[in-house]
Image (cartoon, rainbow, N blue to C red):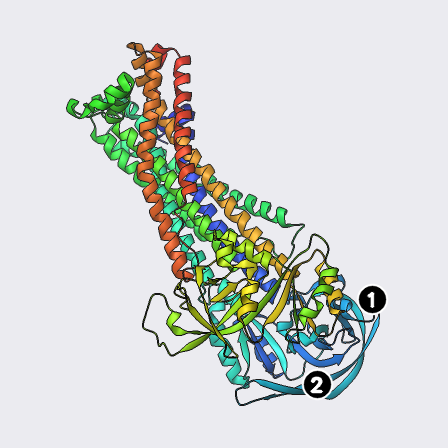
């Protein structure tokens, strides 16, 4: 190491505060890039693994595949893993309810048992063809109270269903034929919480799947394959199907979309927003690193002037600056990467800790984003190099005398320092000094302003990103307000049992009675944007009533008057892209299927939905409006938010065989936990952004003010009073804050609109534009508060120090 490098290294060690501030700026920038990339990579991998747990680890399932296909699958280089399931047939069991009279017996090989998301409540998985696992639902519905170790004798048969339809394609009736296959006695070895029925062939809600072990497969197996490269799914699947004459094969689109193979809005949004966010961070990181390094070198201008005066060449000064950048980079870049990875790890740990007791199916996984680390290293190194080379050339061109005097940054004519008259009249001497300080220290002032603008822009942009992503999450993962839905096989049969069902409910259990009917609307009311419609054409529309209490609450939530709306309709449109929406008129003509028609005023069109009633393009009316005007079939169903949905389901089914009960509790818990996971992830993300932004502002402002200590001390030395000095500092804070906000807020809103536009286009206009006033107000308060606090702190520090010592201090 030559003497100049030793001097540079020694200077960094002696000026610990300056070195530390510069290192912090670089570390924060690199950490932010690494953290953002790590969060997105971890989130995507989490969703991939969750889909595997929920739906099974396979890309393609070949239905009714021949046994010889296994030999090809075993030796295929493109296939990572596989498993197979043999549907054995149906069997009767002692069910208390007629709507699910069958068990469907399926044999799984060992890999299938491990890769299909079976969650055991107790017991173990089957290990031979005489062992079986059942579900807790079978336990609830069976007359026999089965226990682990009990014997279950099943007569297996092949169930054929022949469906008869009329000329219009409507189902008239059907008959079932049972072809006896074999009888086997099974030992119950496990009870599962769930079995993925979509993996096997079965008859909908009329069967409960139970699982035994598959020892030797025969023909007509369900063959599931998982490819090394998901991109090859369609190509390899088509070749295998063609080779063995397999007519039915299905790809696992849910898994492929999270792996980025299938075009899907969710992943497009994820990638698109990640690109926007990282682009903004890269852009701002360049400023942060350059500003931090520029301030550091600017502080050493006098030092470089002294070196030049004793014979150091321009080339040597440039090398010295680059060597300083190299040292800082070698320290800061690894620390930044480590900090970013630690931040992601802590966030994921917090998410998993909060979700541990509530929902253990999906845990966030920690992924190290190697590509992002490489980009962070390259970006950090390149930015440091460019900053150093720019400063080095600039410093080497200035004469040693100017560097030693250290006033080359203040080059301004007296004419340009002339104050507007209103500043002196309104603010007095303090305002004049504040205004002139900002003019004459233009470069330092600009560096501070840019750094603060960058932080505010990132905060507003990221807040919008969080806002839109959270709203999209709530839309995509609707958490229903109910966990039990009841219908009847007899059109209006549910009405007879409502009093008995209500008697089963506890006092704090909420419920909704929904009535719906299909009606016909003339197409002249359709398509608000275009009048080019055939007035003679017609289409179906669903009309709902949701009960008086729920209707009143919904009307109030929309800010409407109940007395007016009770005789009108509220149209619910799913998206802005939905062409099935209606002109607001006083006379929308609806006709029942029986031919009776009436006019219905539409009070408003909204995307809000009452109690998660789903559908695209439907009308909500009051109960009395529906009953008074509709002549024809009305289909009632009931929704309940039960404390113990499993028990209530059993009690309701015992009332009548005609009642159908759907239990949403498991899916509702799953959805709620996914939303919770995403929420914690998003709010953790914005917390990291806020901390880094605040640190950046404090870092830049503190460094800039430290460079001005001598200047501020001189003002006190020439007789500026404490009152005038305090006024000057306060006005500088105000002027600085106003300038930062006037520039940063429009830029932040522009980036916010870009994110909205991207999500809106990807999702068909589901998300509406929100100017994010909350983030703007927070930014305004934070900027003035932080600037004021730091300015006041610096003022107190100067007041505590000896003015002569501050003026003599050269920071070398």
Tell whether 766 sits left or right of 420: right
Q: Is residue 426 above or below residue 236?
A: above
Label 1 element class: loop
Tell whether 22 sits left or right of 497: left
Residue at left 75%, top 74%?
A: 97
Q: Position of residue 753 (x, y in %)?
A: 36, 51
Q: Position of residue 127 (x, y in %)?
A: 75, 70
Confirm whether residue 714 shows in the render.
Answer: yes
Q: Position of residue 291 (x, y in %)?
A: 33, 35
Q: Which residue is mark 1?
A: 147
Q: Which residue is mark 2?
A: 158
Q: Is residue 696 above or below residue 593?
A: above
330 or 345, which lies in front? Answer: 345
Tell me the crowding category of disc 2: few under 14, some 14 to 19, or many 20 or more residues within 10 angstroms, Cα based.
some
3D distance between C-alphas at marks 2 and 1: 27 Å
Confirm whether residue 6 shows in the render.
Answer: no
612 or 700, which lies in front? Answer: 612
């Amino acid at each position: 190491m030559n003497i100049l490098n030793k001097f540079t290294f020694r200077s960094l060690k002696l000026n610990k505060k300056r070195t530390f501030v510069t290192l912090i700026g670089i570390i924060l920038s690199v950490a932010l890039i690494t953290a953002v990339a790590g969060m997105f990579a971890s989130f995507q991998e989490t969703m991939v693994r969750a889909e595997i747990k929920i739906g099974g680890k396979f890309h393609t399932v070949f239905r009714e595949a021949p046994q010889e296909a296994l030999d090809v699958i075993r030796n295929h280089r493109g296939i990572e893993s596989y498993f197979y399931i043999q549907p054995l047939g149906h069997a009767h069991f002692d069910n208390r309810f007629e709507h699910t009279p069958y068990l469907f017996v399926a044999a799984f090989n060992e890999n299938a048992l491990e890769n299909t998301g079976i969650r055991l409540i107790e017991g173990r998985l089957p290990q031979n063809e005489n062992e079986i696992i059942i579900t807790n639902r079978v336990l609830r519905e069976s007359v026999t109270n089965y226990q682990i170790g009990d014997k279950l004798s099943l007569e297996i048969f092949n169930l054929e269903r022949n469906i008869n339809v009329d000329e219009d394609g409507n189902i008239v009736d059907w008959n079932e034929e049972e072809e006896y296959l074999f009888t086997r006695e099974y030992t119950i070895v496990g009870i599962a919480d769930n079995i993925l029925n979509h993996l096997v062939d079965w008859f909908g809600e009329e069967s409960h799947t139970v699982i035994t072990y598959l020892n030797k497969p025969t023909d007509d197996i369900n063959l599931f394959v998982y490819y090394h490269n998901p991109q090859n799914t369609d190509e390899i699947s088509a070749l295998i199907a063609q080779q063995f004459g397999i007519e039915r094969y299905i790809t696992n689109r849910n898994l492929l979309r999270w792996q980025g193979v299938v075009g899907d809005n969710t992943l497009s949004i994820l990638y698109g927003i990640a690109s926007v966010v990282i682009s903004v961070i890269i852009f701002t990181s360049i400023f942060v690193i350059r500003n931090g390094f520029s301030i550091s070198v600017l502080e050493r201008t006098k030092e470089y002037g002294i070196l030049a005066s004793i014979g150091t060449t321009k080339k040597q000064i440039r090398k010295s600056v680059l060597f300083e950048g190299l040292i800082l980079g070698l320290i800061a870049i690894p620390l930044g990467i480590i900090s970013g990875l630690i931040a992601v790890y802590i966030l994921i740990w917090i998410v998993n800790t909060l979700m541990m007791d509530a929902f253990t199916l999906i845990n966030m996984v920690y992924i190290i984003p190697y590509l992002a680390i490489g980009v962070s290293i390259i970006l950090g190194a390149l930015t440091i190099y460019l900053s150093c080379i720019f400063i080095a050339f600039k410093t080497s061109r200035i004469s040693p005398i100017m560097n030693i005097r250290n006033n080359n940054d203040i080059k301004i004519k007296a004419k340009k320092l002339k104050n507007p008259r209103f500043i002196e009249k309104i603010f007095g001497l303090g305002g004049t000094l504040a205004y002139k300080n900002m003019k004459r220290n233009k470069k330092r002032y600009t560096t501070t302003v840019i750094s603060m603008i960058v932080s505010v822009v990132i905060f507003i942009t990221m807040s919008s990103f969080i806002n839109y992503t959270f709203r999209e999450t709530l839309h995509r993962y609707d958490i229903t307000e109910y966990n039990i839905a009841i219908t009847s096989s007899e059109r209006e049969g549910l009405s007879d049992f409502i009093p008995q069902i209500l008697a089963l409910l506890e006092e704090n259990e909420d419920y909704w009675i929904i009535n719906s009917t299909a009606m016909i609307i003339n197409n002249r009311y359709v398509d608000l944007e275009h009048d080019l419609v055939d007035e003679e054409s017609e289409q179906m529309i669903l009309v709902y009533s949701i009960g008086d209490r729920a209707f009143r609450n919904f009307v109030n939530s929309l800010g409407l008057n109940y007395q007016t709306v009770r005789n009108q309709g509220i149209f619910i449109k799913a998206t802005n892209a939905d062409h099935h929406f209606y002109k607001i008129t006083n006379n929308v003509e609806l006709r029942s299927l029986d031919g009776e028609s009436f006019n219905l005023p539409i009070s408003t069109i909204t995307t809000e939905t009452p109690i998660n009633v789903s559908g695209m393009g439907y009308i909500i009316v009051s109960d009395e409006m529906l009953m008074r005007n509709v002549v024809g079939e009305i289909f009632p169903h009931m929704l309940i938010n039960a404390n113990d949905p499993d028990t209530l389901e059993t009690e309701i089914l015992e009332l009548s065989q005609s009642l159908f009960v759907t239990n949403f509790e498991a899916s509702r818990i799953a959805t709620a936990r996914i939303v919770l996971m995403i929420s914690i992830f998003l709010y953790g993300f914005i917390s990291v952004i806020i901390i880094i932004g605040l640190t950046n502002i404090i870092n830049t402002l503190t460094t800039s003010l430290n460079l001005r200590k001598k200047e501020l001390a001189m003002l006190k030395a020439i007789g500026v009073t404490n009152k005038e000095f305090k006024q000057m500092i306060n006005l500088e804070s105000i002027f600085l804050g106003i300038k930062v906000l006037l520039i940063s807020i429009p830029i932040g809103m522009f980036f916010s609109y870009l994110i909205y536009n991207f999500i809106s286009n990807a999702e068909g206009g589901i998300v509406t534009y929100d100017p994010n006033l909350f983030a703007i107000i927070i930014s305004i308060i934070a900027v003035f508060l932080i600037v004021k606090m730091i300015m006041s702190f610096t003022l107190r520090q100067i007041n505590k120090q000896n003015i002569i010592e501050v003026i003599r201090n050269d920071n070398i």
